[in-house]
DNA sequence: TTGTAAGCGTTATCAT
DNA sequence: ATGATAACGCTTACAA
């Protein structure tokens, strides 16, 4: 260590660096050391420290592509609480497509090799891959899974996004607005899984709770994967003809399609049909009429994930799984008549 | 090193790890080593390696708040090219507000302490703080500044977003659509700086290039900082009354405000007034009519920043500054009549 | 109150 | 072709 140029020992310097916990360094020595540091423009090497202490103050975050804005918010939320506790984030983005599972596995191994103190793994709607988690299990590393739906019991913290509650709140809102024939536009039936299933179940629970009958003719689970906006445009007329007085959509894109088509058909929203979306993406503020939507509070989910990981890191037993809360944002597309 | 349980020396193991560049290891020994590794579930410690080689394969990226979607795209672009070269990203987000400069400086120091091989610093529209860059200069670390406008010569790579070209392309497009009285809605006059000045200059250059007169009554540089959407709503009527046949807006939010107000006033877009925004945010696809806007290609800027840093890292002299390209996305708000 | 010395897991140099 | 040994920059008993 260079700073011993101050004429003192390594130990003293190290103590000063770490705030002299036991008050063992004389003020004179301390001053000499600090002066020497300033002169030499000394910067401690955190790598060496990490190596010795076996703590890197680093959390790896793995996402399947930061692209969708989706992930970003979660990362942002997590980052904020982690930064508060002096942790930093090492990014590990996973490619999409066929190599996904392998890429995820490799990435986890890489981050572990870099000795991260813990991991947060954010998964999307794609089918889950237990296999990719093996290295994590082997290493016994603290990890939090966000939005990961699995049958198996896993030794990790879990945070779920409040999709079921979203479905419920949407129905509750529409019911209180006097709507009784509430349609649902969702994901392909055979692909219904993970969070899409949660939303649908929220819808069903909502109906039941308010004693509304489940009407098959008001539910659309498209046969094939399709662009969501186009799906909305295609189905708007059908929804109307089925006699719905409101429609709740799996996501905002579908709702935008509905709104656009209703505009074209000169249908009054919300008078003839109330529309509620899901995710509360920014565009909802600017469409005509502005779109009521359920905000999934992803930043807050990210913060929950971060906090969960921090408690795991502190050795406590995690209260998991955690569920994110959601918030209904009422705009013109569903306001009272 | 644990794997010497294979009955061989550290050196041999290290060679095997690094692919035995000189072919000095016998197949028999190699096999023994690999077996032992598998048995012990051995994972190399990249921290130790970094410490020895003085290379961390890590790039620090500092942004002033990942919030705005803005930064995300740049980070994403950079990440892709860096990942390709086996670099990973360590995030360092800087708080907004009064502590910004100090926070930025601290963050840079922190990342340097962690021995990152290089840095990418993405700044927003806030006033620049040369001071925060001091540690970088001292350390002589390779760094790329994105969207950083400064008078001084700085020993860093630079990437600028193509704002000036954006202004020009918008005017070019409108001119070719037959518009001759093109208004501009921009940033407060006294705060015009950095990229807002670039856009404005692009507008001016466009006018000049197509021999359109600069008309003061067609330019709005609001007195005070104001919500952009509200600004659009407020000024729509004025723009119309000033006799403009087209309007180019500093960003899409202003344009949305214009569109909403024109809708309310029953003004035909683009027949009576063509509207062009800037940034091409997602919402532009869904408003009525859909919004023509200039896409700033931020992913590509991020990629450029990543590549620039990589060439700096390889010791070559960087061709800097680089300018991002832009792309005009034509939608209904400005289509030919 | 201060100094000595060992050790973290690698890579690199030099003998063998 | 393989092995012993130093070194990277730090923390931390323990000794002085």
Image (spheres, coloured by chain):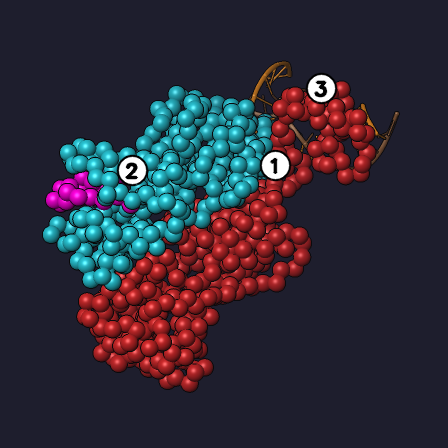
Chain colours: A red, B cyan, C orange, D brown
**Overall secondary structure of the magenta section:** helix
Residue B102: image x %, image y %? Answer: 56, 36
**Which residue is at the front of the view, B214 or A134?**
B214
Asked if residue B266 is positioned above or below residue A172 in the image, the reply reads above
Residue appearing at x 38%, y 35% in the figure: B194
Check disc 3 and report the residue beneath it. A5
- The alpha-carbon separation of the residues under discs 3 and 2 comes to 55 Å
- Give the letter of the chain under mark 3: A
**Which one is in front, A204 or A100?**
A204
Q: Chain of mark 1?
A: B
Q: Give yes or no for contact between labels 1 and 2 (Cβ–Cβ under 8 Å).
A: no
Instruction: Please tell me whether residue A248 belongs to the stretch shown in magenta.
Output: no
Secondary structure of the residue carrying tag 3 is helix
* Of residues A332 and A211, the one drawn nearer to the viewer in this rendering: A332
Label 1 vs label 3: CA separation? 39 Å
The dot on residue B3 is 1
**Left or right of B225: which side holds A234?**
left
> What is the magenta range?
B163-185
Q: Which residue carries the number 2 mark? A: B200
Mark 2, Cα crowd under 10 Å, few <14 / some 14-19 / many 20+, is many
Residue at (61% x, 63% y) in the render: A319
Mark 1 or mark 3, whichever is nearer to me: 3
Q: Are marks 1 and 3 on the same chain?
A: no
In the image, is B322 to the left or to the right of A73?
A: left
**In the rendered image, which quarter is residue A175 located in?**
bottom left
The quarter of the picture where residue A163 lies is bottom left
């Amino acid at each position: 260590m260079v700073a011993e140029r101050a004429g003192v020992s390594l130990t003293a310097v190290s103590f000063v660096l770490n705030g002299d916990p036991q008050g063992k360094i004389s003020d004179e020595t301390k001053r000499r050391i600090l002066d020497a540091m300033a002169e030499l423009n000394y910067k401690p090497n955190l790598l060496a420290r990490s190596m010795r202490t076996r703590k890197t103050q680093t959390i790896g975050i793995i996402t399947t592509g930061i692209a969708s804005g989706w992930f970003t918010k979660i990362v942002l939320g997590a980052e904020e609480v982690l930064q508060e506790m002096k942790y930093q984030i090492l990014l590990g983005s996973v490619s999409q497509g066929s190599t996904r599972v392998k890429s995820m596995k490799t990435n986890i191994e890489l981050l572990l090799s870099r000795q991260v103190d813990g991991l947060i793994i954010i998964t999307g709607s794609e089918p889950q891959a237990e296999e990719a988690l093996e290295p994590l299990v082997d290493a016994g590393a603290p990890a939090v899974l966000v939005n990961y739906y699995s049958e198996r019991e896993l030794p990790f913290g879990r945070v779920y996004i409040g999709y079921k509650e979203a479905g419920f709140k949407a129905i509750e809102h529409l019911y209180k607005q006097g709507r009784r024939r509430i349609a649902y536009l969702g994901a392909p039936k055979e692909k219904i899984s993970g969070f899409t299933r949660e939303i649908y179940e929220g819808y069903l629970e909502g109906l039941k709770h308010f004693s509304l009958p489940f009407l098959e003719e008001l539910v659309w689970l498209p046969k094939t994967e399709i662009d969501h906006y186009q799906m909305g445009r295609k189905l708007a007329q059908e929804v109307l003809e089925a006699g719905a007085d409101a429609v709740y959509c799996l996501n905002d894109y579908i709702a935008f399609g509905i709104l656009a088509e209703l505009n074209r058909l000169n249908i009054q929203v919300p008078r003839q049909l109330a529309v509620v979306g899901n995710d509360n993406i920014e565009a909802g503020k600017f469409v005509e009429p502005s779109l009521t939507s359920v905000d999934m509070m992803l930043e807050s989910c990210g913060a929950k994930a971060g906090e969960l990981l921090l408690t795991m890191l502190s050795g406590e037993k995690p209260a998991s799984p955690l569920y994110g809360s959601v918030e209904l944002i009422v705009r013109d597309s569903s306001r009272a008549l």
